[in-house]
Amino acid sequence: MNINYDYYKIFYYVGKYKNLSLVAKLLNSNQPNLSKLMSKLEMQMGCKLMIRSNRGIALTREGEKLFAHVSVAYNELRAAEAELSAENDLSAGVVCIGATDVAFQSVVVDSLKAFKSEHPNIKILISSYSTSQAIDALRSGVIDFAVVNGPIYKKNDFNQTLLMRYKEHLVDSALNKHWPHDSIELKELSKLPFIGHSSYTSSADFHDKYFARNAMEWEPEIGVSSSGVILPLVKAGLGVAFLPEFATTVAIANKSVRVISPKDFMLPLREILLIEDQGEHCSIAARKLLQQIKKAYVI
């Protein structure tokens, strides 16, 4: 019987979490695709492995038997990969990183450039997550470590290392101005059409809590799930936004956006955090990259 290894990997996570939506996020896939692959696995195994319902997924008796074997095999394979990577002294291997868009721009790119110049044969897999999704992926073993925006509100037992702090700018389109002045008071922010993160992200929580502390409502007119799409929306004149200072440098220089300076308020500095689980088996390649990031960025 010739069954694709990826089928077993997906089945491992489906059996572990019994939630196809969560597994799709962890593996950067989608539910229809995972359902199709699991149906192929059932067809090749010649039996029903799981029962799907509105409450989630339940493994059948046959599914439980297969999951017991797959769990052992999958964990052994991960350990073997790490061991072989160490034996080969970084001549081969894979490092899986989870990162938020902002963390990717500010930390991951420069770190990888230096790392790949020293270790060109190491394969790097990067998954784009929200902070919460990255923690779930690390807990499930999908990634080796995560670089994310803080603060982290989701309870976890991972080691957190502060890499950097950054300032946010309030930016508006230079051509289609939503605010005619160069500066603004805190109470006037409610007059602006904001573009911001959808709920359940660290950035949404950060801004929600900041405005709540100042007895103000915060409800973006355009909600997004990725930081990378905010700047183009601001440039197009669809609203204003709080964006990292380093992410707006070029746009400010070419005058496609402008900064609105705060008169009587200042947003707290944001944080970029490195999240790792030292209790888990980590390959020598992943540990090497972790050391390099810490050396370059730890405050």
Image (cartoon, rainbow, N blue to C red):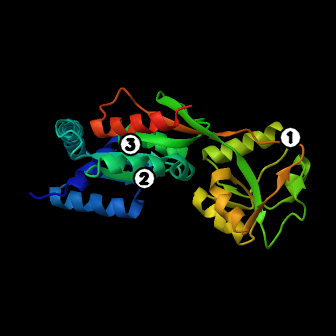
The answer to whether one can see residue 165 in this image is: yes
Q: Earlier in the sequence, mark 2 or mark 1?
A: 2
Which mark is first along the chain, 2 or 3? 3
Q: Nearer the viewer, residue 76 or 102?
A: 102
| 23 up-or-down from 138: above or below | below
Q: Indicate the position of residue 229 as horizontal and vertical percent values.
A: 61, 63
Most extreme residue toward the left, as rendered?
A: 1
Does residue 53 appear anywhere in the picture?
no
In this view of the protein, which residue sits in the foreground, 293 or 18?
Answer: 293
Amino acid on which the number 1 mark rests in the picture: Ala
Q: Residue 61: x, y in percent?
A: 23, 43
Which picture quadrant has residue 3?
A: bottom left
**What residue is shown at x 47% (from left), y 27% (from top)?**
157
Q: Secondary structure at mark 2?
A: strand
Residue at horizontal 39 percent and vertical 64 percent from the top: 32
Relative to the observer, which residue lies in front, 49 or 151? 151
* Disc on the earlier residue, 1 or 3: 3
**Residue at the disc numbered 3:** 17
Give the residue pinned by disc 2.
127
